Amino acid sequence: MIKKIAAISFSPTGSTRDLVDKAAETLAGRLKLPLSYDSFTLPKDQKKVRRFTEETLVVFGMPTYAGRVPNKALPFLKTLFVGGGAPAVALVTFGNRSYDSSLTELNEELTAAGFRVFAAGAFARPHAFANIGHEHPTKEDNNLLETLLGVAEVKIGQEDFGSITIKDGAPVGPYYIPLGEDGEPAKFLKAKPLTDFEKCDHCGKCAAVCPMGAINKNNTDEVPGTCIKCQACIVYCHTHAKFFHDDRFLSHKAMLEKNYVRTAQSEIFYR
């Protein structure tokens, strides 16, 4: 019997966290169950192992990076969570291009960790760095989420937590290869954010919100660690001092803004 609900997310810019929290809060309110919030976005939260039992309903969300679960967050997904038979709702967000294999991968990883994923959804949201998808969440997105939560509520009441099939059982595919405006692969793996010193007030927020701990907190213009292009430093900079100036990165951004202006469709999955 479900006695509590846990909202868990990896969400550098907050979009996935907002979706997960909204879903978990809705279910907690309807089922009159206590709700806890957890995140493994920041380095300080990427060490503790979380263990669950069949008495906790877990709403678990991650963003889509290159059509998959973020590869640098995958080790955390594999090592920090012990499902213990806990039923789970798996959610991913994607930036108006495509979620490709991210939801399938999240479902597989949660199942391997001992969760029972009985409902899942991929929800379009504004892109993290390209100027597309700002119409999300749309009325259709919200209606799909409401449908998914309605199904979840019924299944919780019936204790029906049977496994689901996503995209007709298609396997996890390769990572999406970013393209530039010329249609050729845009290789910007080593691109890192720069700082406009006329705007920067050295508050240290960018270093504090970096999920990889990549930014030097004592000199925030230095990025000695791995940058995953999550845009957290840009989104949370209150003076708008952080930016990317890598030509290949900007070419990919332009390609997305040219080819993915249509409104992407969210999708939900359940038995």
Image: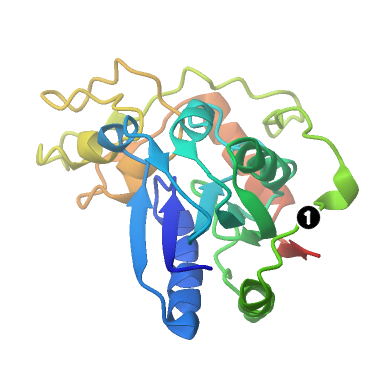
Question: Residue 105 appears in which quarter of the rendering?
Answer: top right
261 and 264: which is toward the camera: 264
Instruction: Return the residue nearer the eye: 81 or 63.
Output: 81
Residue 193 screen position, x and y as percent: 35, 30
User: In this rendering, does residue 265 appear at all?
Assistant: no
- Relative to 211, residue 64 above or below: below
Is 264 drawn above or below residue 39 in the view shown? below
Farthest-out residue, front: 1
Residue ranking furthest to the right: 168
Graded by Cα atoms within 10 Å as few (under 14), some (14 to 19) or many (20 or more), the crowding at tag 1 reads some
Q: Identify the element where label 1 is drawn.
A: loop
- Image spot of residue 175 (x, y percent): 70, 29
Name the image quarter holding residue 196: top left
Looking at the image, which residue is at 9% across and 41% down? 201
Q: Give coordinates of residue 229: x percent, y percent.
A: 46, 33
* Residue at the image point whose x is 51% and y is 35% from the top: 77
Viewer can see residue 175: yes
* Side of 18 where 61 appears, left or right: right
Residue plotted at (63% across, 60% down): 124
Name the residue type under label 1: Ile
Q: Which residue is mark 1?
A: 164
Nearer the observer, 118 or 105: 118
